Amino acid sequence: MAGNLNIGEVFNEYKNKVYRLSLSITRNEKDAEDTMQNVFFKVLKNLKYFRNKSSLSTWIYKITYKGYSPMCYNSFS
């Protein structure tokens, strides 16, 4: 399955969903954008390992949740 996936198509399909999920986690637009960028970097890096044991959206959402670290987004304002 991974060989048939195009990262551009994956990004276009999931960018808004990942952003909204990231925003709900971080509650900050800048942090949500950073999280989204990190998620798609991980997706690009690991797309070849996607084995279709779950849906692509589930796999991407898991990367989003697991990739978020509250320590990375502490605000001192």
Image (tube, rainbow, N blue to C red):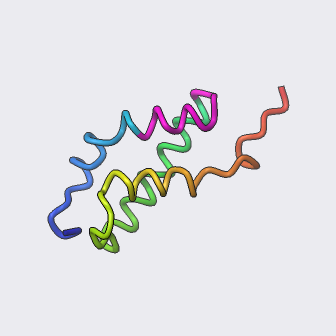
Position in image of residue 59 (x %, y %): 39, 59
Looking at this view, is 14 or 77 the one in front? 14
Q: Residue furthest left?
A: 4
Residue 23 colored in magenta in the image: yes
Looking at this view, is 40 or 65 the one in front? 65
Label tally? 0
Residue 13 figure quarter = top left
Left or right, 70 with reference to 58 = right
Position in image of residue 23 (x %, y %): 55, 32
Q: Residue at x 36, y 60 (%)?
A: 44
Q: What segment carries the magenta color?
A: 18-29
Position in image of residue 65 (x %, y %): 55, 51
Q: Majority secondary structure of the magenta segment?
A: helix
Q: Residue at x 47, y 51 (%)?
A: 39
Looking at this view, is 25 or 28 the one in front? 25
Left or right, 65 with reference to 69 = left
Residue 31 colored in magenta in the image: no
User: Where 21 falls versus 46 (above or below)?
Assistant: above
Looking at this view, is 45 or 61 the one in front? 61
Position in image of residue 36 (x %, y %): 48, 43
Residue 12 figure quarter = top left
Q: Quadrant of the N terminus?
A: bottom left
Q: Residue furthest front?
A: 54
Q: Residue at x 68, y 51 (%)?
A: 69
Q: Residue at x 57, y 57 (%)?
A: 66
Q: Quadrant of the C terminus?
A: top right
